[in-house]
């Protein structure tokens, strides 16, 4: 067997850790950041409860790190500029996340209002039926 085929088949017998269904693929395409928002730490080989980091905490940490790099002579101007670009990208993603949450809350409120409206309608119909 040629060496290239050996390299190509090296992981052929390793079991697949995750098989994605169509639904999971769609979810990952729509909201890929949801899975990366949760951070868990391991201690003594056991998983502890997952700790969720808010956008605000992440922004504060990123800003603090950026200030550190700006004042530290070991970081070049190019590296600091790259960090500013990362922060700008972060802020855009944060804004998109908030826009998505606001839109979802709007739809939830609309559904709630429609359900209340339908309940009132049904009560009126029942009341008129028995009168």
Image (tube, rainbow, N blue to C red):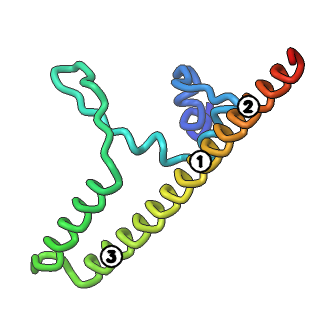
* Residue found 37% across the figure and 39% down from its top: 38
* Residue 112, quarter of picture: top right
Query: Residue 120 got which mark?
Result: 2
* Residue 130, quarter of picture: top right
Cα distance between the residues tagged 3 and 1: 30 Å
Q: Please, which residue is most extreme toward the top here?
A: 130
Closest to the observer, 32 or 119: 119
Q: Is residue 117 above or below residue 45?
A: below
Crowd around label 3: few <14 · some 14–19 · many ≥20 (10 Å): some
* Residue found 79% across the figure and 32% down from its top: 121
Q: Please, which residue is most extreme toward the front here?
A: 131
Closest to the observer, 80 or 13: 80
Query: Mark 3: which secondary structure?
Result: helix
Q: State left or right for residue 46 relative to residue 92.
A: left
Closest to the observer, 124 or 61: 124
Locate the C terminus and report the quarter of the image it occupies: top right
* Residue that mark 1 sits on: 104
Q: Are marks 1 and 2 in contact (CB under 8 Å)?
A: no
Q: Position of residue 105 (x, y in %)?
A: 56, 47
Query: Mark 1: which secondary structure?
Result: helix
Query: Residue 84 got which mark?
Result: 3
* Residue found 66% across the figure and 41% down from its top: 113
Mark nearest the camera among 2 and 3 is: 2
Locate the N terminus and report the quarter of the image it occupies: top right
Q: Is residue 131 visible?
A: yes
Mark nearest the camera among 3 and 1 is: 1
Q: State left or right for residue 62 relative to residue 123.
A: left
Mark before the other along the chain sequence, 1 or 2: 1
* Residue found 44% across the figure and 60% down from its top: 94
Q: Position of residue 65 (x, y in %)?
A: 19, 66
């Amino acid at each position: 067997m040629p060496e290239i085929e050996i390299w190509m088949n090296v992981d052929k017998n390793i079991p697949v850790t995750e098989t994605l269904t169509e639904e999971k693929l769609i979810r990952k395409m729509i909201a890929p950041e949801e899975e990366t928002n949760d951070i868990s730490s391991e201690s003594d080989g056991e998983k502890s409860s997952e700790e969720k980091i808010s956008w605000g905490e992440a922004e504060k940490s990123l800003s603090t790190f950026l200030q550190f790099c700006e004042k530290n002579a070991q970081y070049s101007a190019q590296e600091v500029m790259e960090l500013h670009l990362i922060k700008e990208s972060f802020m855009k993603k944060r804004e998109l996340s908030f826009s998505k949450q606001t839109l979802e809350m709007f739809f939830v409120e609309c559904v709630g209002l429609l359900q209340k409206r339908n309940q009132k309608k049904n009560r009126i119909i029942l009341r008129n039926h028995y009168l």
